[in-house]
Image (cartoon, grey):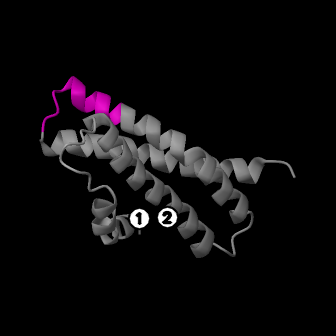
Amino acid sequence: MGYAVVIGLHQALVAAFDLPRNVRVPVWLAAGVFYGGIAAVVVAGAVVAVRVALRDTPRIRHTATRMALLLPPALAAAIVAASAFGWALNFPLTPVAIGTEAAIVLATFLAAAASARRWSLTARG
């Protein structure tokens, strides 16, 4: 769902950040804004999807709230870990390397979502 929104908004994002040619933006800043925007859409999409699709599940509101708290730092750590893995191998474009980087991010995402659910079920109150 998040991917579809990012693709749909691509032209709007490009137009919003279309800077004059004499303005130089550091690559790390441009990448951070781009990937941070994608991560924000993914987190928002995941929280909304869980909240809507599982609306009849007990304590799902608490789970969605905790997902909103846990997913951003978890995804930030996963992106750093995946980048470090790629950097250690000199960023090869092999299916194994790219698959491993994707698996790092996906596993962290799933672990954070599962932790949010567990936290909401074991919390008192």
Q: Could you tell me which quadrant the N terminus lies in? A: bottom left
Q: Position of residue 121 (x, y in %)?
A: 74, 53
Q: Which residue is mark 2?
A: 45
In the image as oriented, which residue stretches furthest toward the right? 125
Quarter holding residue 100: top left
Q: Nearer the viewer, residue 55 or 6?
A: 6
Q: Which residue is mark 1?
A: 2
Q: Position of residue 84 (x, y in %)?
A: 30, 28
In the image as oriented, which residue stretches furthest toward the top? 88
Specify whether 26 is left or right of 121.
Answer: left
Q: Position of residue 10 (x, y in %)?
A: 29, 65
Please say if the residues under marks 1 and 2 sit with CB atoms less than 8 Å apart: yes
Alpha carbons under labels 1 and 2: distance apart: 5 Å
Highlighted range, magenta:
81-92
Q: Is residue 11 above or below residue 34?
A: below
Q: Amino acid at mark 1?
A: Gly
Quarter holding residue 6: bottom left
Q: Secondary structure at mark 2?
A: helix
